[in-house]
Image (cartoon, helix red, strand yellow):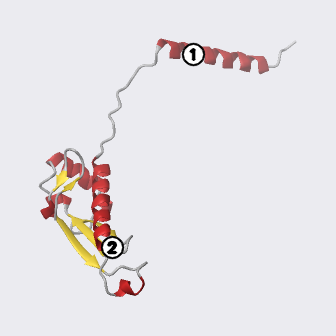
Amino acid sequence: MEDLPVTERLTIPGRELRVSFARSGGPGGQNVNKVETKVELRWRPAESSALSEEDREWLLERLARRLTADGDLIVSSSRTRDQIRNREDTRRRLAAIVAQALERPKQRRPTRPTREARLRRLEEKRRRAELKQARKKIEV
């Protein structure tokens, strides 16, 4: 099997991907009982040579709920009646899942409010105070 490009930095070697086929439910008429169009693609990120140690830890943490007891990430497809299209669909979906899991949140850099923002806040605070003062009963 050929390598699977995931991001600019990551390409999963084809030798790490395992493909299996099965009979698929859904559309296909009589063909569905005799042709194995469902495709199941497996990849084991814990043993992948494509990942750095840091990426591996991050990925395993993010994908923990999707991994089997053996540590396989399984993607299957039976969307079409064609095995080749289903194979491409599983490859595309696996790449999308891994790419999304590898995304790291942007690091927040704390900022200070601008002078104008501080003045606006104080002005609004003063207006609210005046409004509340105006509601009070005036004692005569």
Residue 72 visible in the snapshot: no
On-image quarter of the C terminus: top right
Q: Crowding near pointer 2: few (<14 within 10 Å), some, many (20+)?
A: some
In the image, 29 versus 136, the foreground residue is: 29
Residue visible at 28% across and 67% down?
87
Residue 32 placed where, x, y %? 37, 83
Count how many numbered circles sit on residues in the image: 2
Residue visible at 71% across and 15% down?
130
Residue 69 placed where, x, y %? 24, 69
Q: Which residue is mark 2?
A: 82
Image quarter of residue 77? bottom left
Q: Which residue is mark 1?
A: 120
Question: Which of marks 2 and 1 precedes in the sequence?
Answer: 2
Q: Crowding near pointer 1: few (<14 within 10 Å), some, many (20+)?
A: few
- Of helix, strand and loop, which one carries label 1? helix
Residue 27 placed where, x, y %? 43, 78
Comparing labels 1 and 2, the label whose residue is closer to the camera: 2
Q: Are marks 1 and 2 in contact (CB under 8 Å)?
A: no
Q: Answer above or below: position of 60 versus 119.
A: below
Image quarter of residue 12? bottom left
- Of helix, strand and loop, which one carries label 2? loop
Instruction: Give the residue type at disc 2.
Output: Asp
Q: Answer above or below: position of 8 versus 12.
A: above
Q: Answer above or below: position of 81 versus 119.
A: below
Residue 76 placed where, x, y %? 32, 69
Please, which residue is most extreme toward the right here? 140
Q: In the displayed structure, does residue 100 sit left or right of residue 126?
A: left
Instruction: Give the residue type at disc 1.
Output: Arg
On-image quarter of the N terminus: bottom left
In the image, 55 versus 78, the foreground residue is: 78
Image quarter of residue 97? bottom left
Q: Answer above or below: position of 3 versus 24.
A: above
